[in-house]
Image: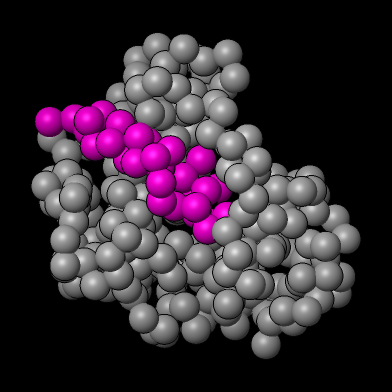
């Protein structure tokens, strides 16, 4: 089993104030102090999204979803800041149900966010659809209402059209678990299950950071404590370091972040 106490100790010893605020929320359910949330909100543009860089002049789909994930980790996936971001995402959806970055970001966009690239389009559509879904579940766990229902229906329908018959998807690994969450919540249960099956088959070869991110994401929708989440937690137990942390994909500076993600996956 995952050593929760050791993971908590690692974050306390190595985390910055924001990371310790994230830990406090995970441990006690206490939302982050207002100044921590305001620090994130300070970069929000008038349109509602966040730019790809501090000097950016247009909001970015990828950056906005990243900020929503940060706010979610702090127990703050509600309120005016989040509402503006979600409304902007809904407005930014393209007519075919997809999301793409603005053309002006082509020179600085990472591979998973390149404007016009099919793999990036599937990734961004899955991620944007996922965070609109997660916010809707946060506001109403039983989904008796969904303010972004039409937006999510278009996104889910397009994602389904991109899946291969065997459940694989022509995009990055992370597109898979975001798509699985989006499709499950939109009642594409069979399609979501096929994607989850592929993720389960790939699990033994996944990096710990990917396992943690997948499990933490799928816990945000009404998936239940199913076999994939149980298998992911077992894999995290196998890859936890003796100091309580996990290795990130971006180097030691991000080990605290992925340790917090693993804690969220296991709580």
Q: Give the residue furthest to the front.
A: 34
User: Which quadrant of the rendered structure holds the N terminus?
Assistant: bottom right
**Is 67 left or right of 79, judged from the image as shown?**
right
**Is 86 left or right of 15, judged from the image as shown?**
left
Residue 59 location (% of width, % of height): 41, 23
| Closer-to-camera residue (202/120) | 120
For the point 57% across and 55% down, which residue is it?
Answer: 74
User: Which quadrant of the rendered structure holds the C terminus?
Assistant: bottom right
For the point 43% across and 70% down, which residue is it?
Answer: 219
The magenta stretch is 67-95
Residue 190 location (% of width, % of height): 18, 72
User: On the image, which quarter does residue 96 sit in?
Assistant: top left
User: On the image, which quarter does residue 81 sit in?
Assistant: top left
Is residue 248 shown to the viewer in this render?
no
User: On the image, which quarter does residue 104 sit in?
Assistant: top left
Residue 85 covered by magenta stretch: yes
**203 shown above or below 150:** below
Residue 42 covered by magenta stretch: no
Q: Taken as a whole, is the magenta stretch helix, strand or loop?
A: helix
Residue 191 location (% of width, % of height): 20, 66
Residue 261 location (% of width, % of height): 61, 62
């Amino acid at each position: 089993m995952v050593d929760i106490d050791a993971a908590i100790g690692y974050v306390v010893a190595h985390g910055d104030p924001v990371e310790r605020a994230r830990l406090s929320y995970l441990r006690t359910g206490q939302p982050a102090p207002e100044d921590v949330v305001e620090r994130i909100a300070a970069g929000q543009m008038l349109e509602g999204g966040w730019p790809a860089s501090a000097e950016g002049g247009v909001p970015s789909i990828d950056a906005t979803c990243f900020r929503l994930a940060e706010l979610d980790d702090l127990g703050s996936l509600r309120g005016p800041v989040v509402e503006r971001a979600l409304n902007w995402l809904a407005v930014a959806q393209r007519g075919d149900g997809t999301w793409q970055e603005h053309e002006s970001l082509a020179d600085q966009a990472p591979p998973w966010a390149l404007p016009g690239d099919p793999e990036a389009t599937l990734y961004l559509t899955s991620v944007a659809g996922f965070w609109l879904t997660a916010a809707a579940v946060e506001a109403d766990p039983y989904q008796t209402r969904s303010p972004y229902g039409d937006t999510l229906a278009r996104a889910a329908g397009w994602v389904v059209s991109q899946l291969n018959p065997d459940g694989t998807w022509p995009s990055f690994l992370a597109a898979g678990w975001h798509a699985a969450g989006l499709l499950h919540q939109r009642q594409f249960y069979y399609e979501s299950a096929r994607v989850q099956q592929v993720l389960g088959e790939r699990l033994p070869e996944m990096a710990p950071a990917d396992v943690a991110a997948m499990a933490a994401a799928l816990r945000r929708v009404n998936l239940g404590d199913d076999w994939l989440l149980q298998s992911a937690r077992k894999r995290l137990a196998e890859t936890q370091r003796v100091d309580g942390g996990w290795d990130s994909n971006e180097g030691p500076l991000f080990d605290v972040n992925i340790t917090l993600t693993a804690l969220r996956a296991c709580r």
